[in-house]
Amino acid sequence: MSPDQPDRQVDPRITNDPKSRYGRCFGFMKGRCLPHSFFNRQTDFSFTLHIITLSLASNMHLVGSLLSFALALGSLVAASPIASHDKRSFVERDGTNYTVFEHAATGAKLEFVKNSGICETTPGVNQYSGYLSVGTNMNSMIRQSMLEQLREHVCFLNHLFRKIVLIDLARLYIDQPIGVGFSYGTDSVTSTVTAAPYVWKLIQAFYAQFPQYENRNFGIFTESYGGHYGPEFAEYFEQQNAAITSGSVTGENIKLVALGVNNGWFDATLQEKAYVDFSYSNSYKPLISASQHTTYLNTYQTQCLPALQSCSSSGSNSACKNADTTCYNSIEGPLSQSGDFDVYDIRSPSNDPNPPETYVTYLQSSAVVKAIGAQSTYQECPNAPYQKFASTGDNPRSFLSQLSDVVQKGVQTVVWAGDADWICNWFGNQAAAEAVNYSGQSSFKGAALTAYNVAGKQAGTFKTVGKLSFARIFGAGHEVPFYQPAAALQVFKQTMQGLPLSST
């Protein structure tokens, strides 16, 4: 990341444009709103920590992709005794009871309610929601997946999927940066790189409050802008593990075994070109003609690509902001307006009601806000967090080197994509996977895609070499679990178990 100090200039584009990667995406719900987990290109990555008993968003979902962290096996149980220097207390506020945990080592504070009755009602399964406070007045919502859980995960999927997921793992969702979802306060996060340390502190505080999870396998599953967040967070966690081992950092090792990114935004150089190719030759309907395809390729080569190369070579905020604007104005923007289609599912018109968004009204209801211990109004795609990321030119910066480092370190990694998504389409995701630098790269790139079956029925195509797998899921838009829950569950379980993808 460039050492430049980010400015605060307002991006000229209208960030609430639902077809813009800076629109819903950055609010982090559906498109590339900042980071998001089991995510969108929007980065499910605002840090709302959702803790549910289960196994972890393009512009960045929720300006925070929903970032999902999966802890293998087990459900949350009563916390073990804490170290004497940490503090735990209880407080009642407006009729809601909170547990407050202060973590001495990181200065982080967890304030949460238990078993709100929102979404998760399975007997014997605990859920927690509340806030993680780190830094100065930085309060990230920690909760049981309100966003992705309602849109594409356990609250929305069939009973079987819900049971399997909730019983097997402990899962945390995080709303971050500050300002997305229910998070509130002062936001000092201006890029993917500056977001990672706060999430690491969150996990450290979580382990201190729930030490029974310290030695469990840990996975990160993300979506959309999670193509930035997932690789960067995974690499940072691994770096911190090494520092802990060497004695230069004090903390608990995070046993990272898996990274999953669906329909991610990894590398603009590869994925801006993929917009052109996918718009012409996807398997559903051509959005542009052959002559337009040729014209757009020429525009990519003469306008977008040089700007991206300047961003990559200089690393400056100004060069990367220019690349972002240049490529959007010349490639992504015009193509997204080339027809009446949903950028998250090209099979549908732009006013596609799916996945449904009735959850917004639900999450903003006073009863739900009180039950989950929220202290702010739910915001899906706020502009302020987006402006901070835009000011550093975060979007066009490549995170392939971080993804490569994670695969090289032996973390089981899957890049997978619904084949009806346009905003982070499978052409670009396959290109990104094939660009991962590791010992199996040549074999992986040369391998053909073969049938990926779920219970004997083909759900897509895939290939796998060593610790890296790629899958194209048929008939799925941006948020794969909403469209194809059985395939999504199989991808998740196999990867979390440290296994390469395989048909069943």
Image (cartoon, rainbow, N blue to C red):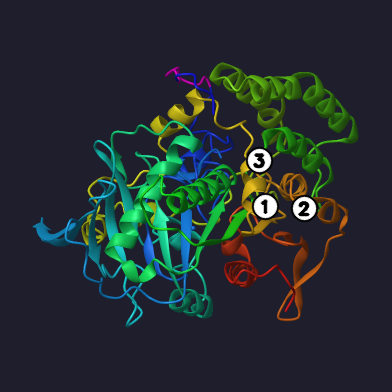
Mark 2: secondary structure: loop
Amino acid at the residue labelled 3: Ser
The x and y percentages for residue 329 are: 66, 23
| Image disc number at residue 439 | 2
Q: Nearer the viewer, residue 458 or 268?
A: 268
The x and y percentages for residue 450 are: 84, 66
Q: Is residue 440 magenta?
A: no
Q: Which residue is mark 3?
A: 401
Dividing the image into 4 quarters, which one contains the N terminus? top right
Q: Are marks 3 and 2 in contact (CB under 8 Å)?
A: no
Precedes in sequence: disc 2 or disc 1? 1
Q: Are marks 1 and 3 in contact (CB under 8 Å)?
A: no
Q: Is residue 5 above or below residue 349?
A: above
Q: Is residue 414 visible?
A: yes
Graded by Cα atoms within 10 Å as few (under 14), some (14 to 19) or many (20 or more), the crowding at tag 2 reads few
Of badges 3 and 2, nearer the viewer stands: 2
Q: Which residue is mark 1?
A: 408
Which residue is found at the position 57% from the left and 21% from the top?
Answer: 321
Q: Is residue 266 visible?
A: no
Precedes in sequence: disc 1 or disc 3? 3
Instruction: Please provide the residue range marked out in magenta.
Output: 6-12
| Image disc number at residue 373 | none
Q: Is residue 54 above or below residue 133?
A: below
Q: Are marks 2 and 1 in contact (CB under 8 Å)?
A: yes
Locate residue 118 relative to residue 222 in the image: left or right: left
Mark 1: secondary structure: helix
The x and y percentages for residue 116 are: 26, 67
Amino acid at the residue labelled 1: Gln
Precedes in sequence: disc 3 or disc 2? 3
- Cα separation, mark 1 vs mark 3, equals 10 Å
Locate residue 51 relative to residue 13 in the image: left or right: left
Q: Nearer the viewer, residue 260 or 80?
A: 80
